[in-house]
Image (cartoon, rainbow, N blue to C red):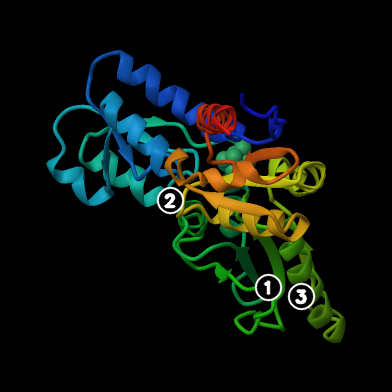
Amino acid sequence: MGKDKIIEIDPSAGFCFGVENAIQIAEENMNQGSPVYGLGHMVHNEVEIGRLDQLGMKTISVMDFPDLSPGKVIIRAHGEPPSTYALAQAHKIDIIDATCPIVSNLQKKIYKQHRKLDREKEQIIIFGKEGHPETIGLMGQTRGEAILITDPNDISAIDRRKTIFLFSQTTMDPDQFEVLEENIRKITQVSEKTKFEANCSICGQMKKRKPELRNFASKHDLIIFVSGAKSSNGAMLYNFCKQQNKFTFWIHSVEDIDPEWLKMDGSIGISGATSTPSWQLKQVKEQLEALAKEL
Ligand code: SF4
């Protein structure tokens, strides 16, 4: 006879709106029969990428544009720099733009700021992850002229004599953005001529995520955190979750579940990153329930 164990999925976990929307667009197009190419992985989650591959999605890069057979190319939620659209046009490639509308608005804002930039007196700073597709798309709005800051405590690349327009990749850690803002304010206070405009462009879903996760992690005795190994959002949220509840374990797929966890007393919470699909969270819950019955 198995033990009754409380196993709950974090109601705030699962895909963010932008990723959900992009995957829905991809699936709708695959259902129409013509080949669908994903420009880069649709989401930083190996299991979901595997599912989309099974449905027929082929993942490509811009380097494949010259040799592409007829079909549609989907731009994922993270967006792309203007050079990608220009290259697609040059090769007469049919683009389906699934850029998240929030990212798209941010790209337009940075583009406009860059167009009117007085390079002698002003500079654009982007807080983001080096090599992250969204940051590549944002930097592209400035033809690569913006200064990329990846560490909020290293602002040595900023010119202290120029006005600063600060933007952020939508998925950065809001606490880290505050540290950066504070560090920049210190230099602008020293030089009265330096103006500072901070545009906190971190997505609302990201801002809510940490407080929600803090509540959820403290409600349960053990937390299983599900996300792809390459998801930077997943790594950040997992570390945060572990700070709230030391019995937090990170898994990338249902196969990583350790049956020993079920032997611990108390309830189990299942949470994940904005790139973790709800079906995977359910799959983990079902597996845990099956293992609990065997105890
Ligand atoms: S995190 Fe927010 S801005 Fe980024 S893709 Fe998701 S919904 Fe869009």
The structure residue drawn at horizontal position 60% and vertical position 52%, both measured from the top left corner, is 249
Secondary structure state at the residue bearing disc 2: loop
Whether residue 44 is visible, yes or no, is no
Which sits earlier in the primary sequence, circle 2 or circle 1?
2
Q: Which numbered marker is on residue 81?
A: 2
How many marks can you see? Answer: 3
Q: Is residue 142 above or below residue 2?
A: below
Verify CB contact (< 8 Å) between mark 1 and mark 3. Answer: no
Does 125 sit left or right of 29 as displayed?
right
Does 126 sit left or right of 44 as displayed?
right
The amino acid pointed to by label 1 is: Pro
Residue 259 place in picture, x, y as percent: 53, 43
Which sits earlier in the primary sequence, circle 1 or circle 3?
1
Q: Which residue is mark 3?
A: 184
For mark 3, does the 10 Å Cα neighbourhood hold few (<14), some (14 to 19), or many (20 or more) residues? many
Query: Closer to the camera: disc 1 or disc 3?
Result: 1
Q: Is residue 191 above or below residue 294?
A: below
Residue 246 place in picture, x, y as percent: 72, 59
| Rendered-image quarter of ligand 1 | top right
The answer to which image quadrant residue 92 occupies is top left
The amino acid pointed to by label 2 is: Pro
For mark 1, does the 10 Å Cα neighbourhood hold few (<14), some (14 to 19), or many (20 or more) residues? some
Whether residue 251 is visible, yes or no, is yes
Residue 8 place in picture, x, y as percent: 69, 31
Secondary structure state at the residue bearing disc 3: helix
Q: Which residue is mark 1?
A: 152
Verify CB contact (< 8 Å) between mark 3 and mark 2. Answer: no
The amino acid pointed to by label 3 is: Ile
Which sits earlier in the primary sequence, circle 3 or circle 2?
2
